[in-house]
């Protein structure tokens, strides 16, 4: 049975829009965004988080390794700040425009730039980076598929790029996968299906075996900012229309809409989602500078 969600708690404290949510690997999560603050929410029953680090400008992408060994901030001006064991290793500008996503591979960190370039950062020699041109427009989202050794990259040109995860070379391309920017990518947890969401307000699904389109639904009244698989067969979407939508992950049938004021949802764009299996809770963050925790309704509600 598809679950339904309700408002549980709101977390405040950020001074700017929130663009990043990431699990801490235990019982909490990290958040980061327009105020440059990295906040750790280790106890979801408490109202306050702990500031772990701060950089001087808007952060669009943040990557925190286990136990905070390395923290990477991808910033508005195209620079990357690398913090290791609470010390800033370097702050280096390599992209001509903002960094919109970060990814970890075995030997490298990858940054996706607004200049259409992929930044490849050596883990062994911090600060050493080379750039690879992928698109003439911004790179917005990336997803690693370890089983196929592929990296899927969404661009502002509406294209989906398929890269070899070892060579980082573009092997295939789906042109005009969306009518405009591909903002988010996620994978079906059980089937070889890729989901994409874009500035054209659409959610689309693709066969990972053939890269052929499967489904397409007009999902939000504005940009689809983020997609993640959720519990019990659902796909969760966050939109610039201030809504969170819950879909049947197999049919893409809409099952629930979470919004304000009815559901005590966000009052501005919802930018990011995070689901925890261990805690059985959903967290969302947006332009209203807040994080909202959602719980699953009991079956008899």
Image (cartoon, grey):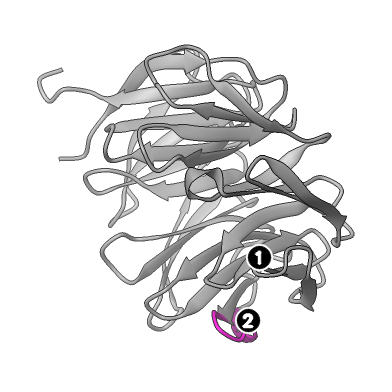
* Circle 2: element type: loop
- Marks 2 and 1 in Cβ contact (< 8 Å): yes
> Could you tell whether 245 is left or right of 130 in the image?
left
- Residue 11 vertical position relative to residue 163 in the rendered view, above or below: above
- Residue that appears at 80% across and 58% down: 114
| Image coords of residue 272 (percent x, y) | 54, 38
Q: Which mark is residue 168?
A: 2
- Residue that appears at 43% across and 66% down: 194
Q: Can residue 243 be seen?
A: no
- Residue 230 vertical position relative to residue 56 in the rendered view, above or below: below
| Image coords of residue 241 (percent x, y) | 59, 32
* Circle 1: element type: strand
Q: Which mark is residue 110?
A: 1
Counting residues from the N terminus, which is met first, the one under dot 2 or under dot 1?
1
- Residue that appears at 76% across and 45% down: 88
Density class for disc 1 (Cα within 10 Å; few <14, some 14-19, many ≥20) is some
In reply to whether residue 170 is colored magenta, the answer given is: yes
Front one among 214 and 236: 236
Query: Bounds of the magenta span?
Result: 164-173
Front one among 89 and 148: 89
């Amino acid at each position: 049975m598809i679950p339904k969600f309700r408002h549980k708690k709101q977390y405040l404290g950020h001074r700017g829009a929130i663009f990043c949510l990431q699990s801490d690997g235990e019982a909490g999560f990290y958040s980061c965004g327009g105020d440059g603050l990295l906040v750790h929410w280790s106890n979801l029953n408490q109202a306050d988080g702990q500031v772990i680090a701060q950089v001087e400008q808007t952060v669009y992408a943040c990557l925190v390794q286990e136990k905070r060994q390395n923290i990477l901030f991808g910033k508005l001006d195209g620079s990357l700040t690398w913090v290791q064991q609470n010390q800033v290793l370097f702050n280096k500008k390599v992209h001509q425009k903002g960094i919109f996503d970060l990814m970890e591979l075995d030997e490298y960190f990858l940054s996706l730039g607004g200049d259409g370039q992929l930044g490849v950062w050596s883990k062994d020699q911090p600060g050493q980076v080379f750039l690879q041109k992928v698109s003439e427009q911004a790179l917005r989202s990336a997803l690693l598929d370890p089983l196929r050794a592929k990296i899927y990259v969404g661009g502002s040109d509406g294209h989906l790029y398929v890269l070899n995860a070892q060579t980082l070379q573009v092997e295939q391309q789906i042109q005009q996968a969306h009518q405009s920017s591909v903002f988010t990518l996620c994978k079906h947890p059980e089937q070889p299906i890729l989901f994409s969401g874009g500035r054209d307000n659409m959610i689309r699904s693709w066969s990972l075996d053939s890269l052929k389109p499967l489904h397409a639904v007009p999902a939000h009244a504005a940009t689809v900012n983020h997609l993640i698989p959720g519990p019990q067969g659902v796909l969760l979407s966050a939109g610039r229309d201030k809504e969170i939508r819950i879909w049947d992950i197999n049919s893409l049938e809409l099952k629930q809409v979470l919004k304000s004021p009815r559901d005590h949802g966000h009052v501005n764009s919802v930018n990011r989602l995070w689901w925890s299996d261990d805690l059985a809770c959903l967290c969302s963050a947006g332009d209203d500078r807040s994080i909202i925790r959602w719980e699953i309704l009991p079956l008899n509600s």
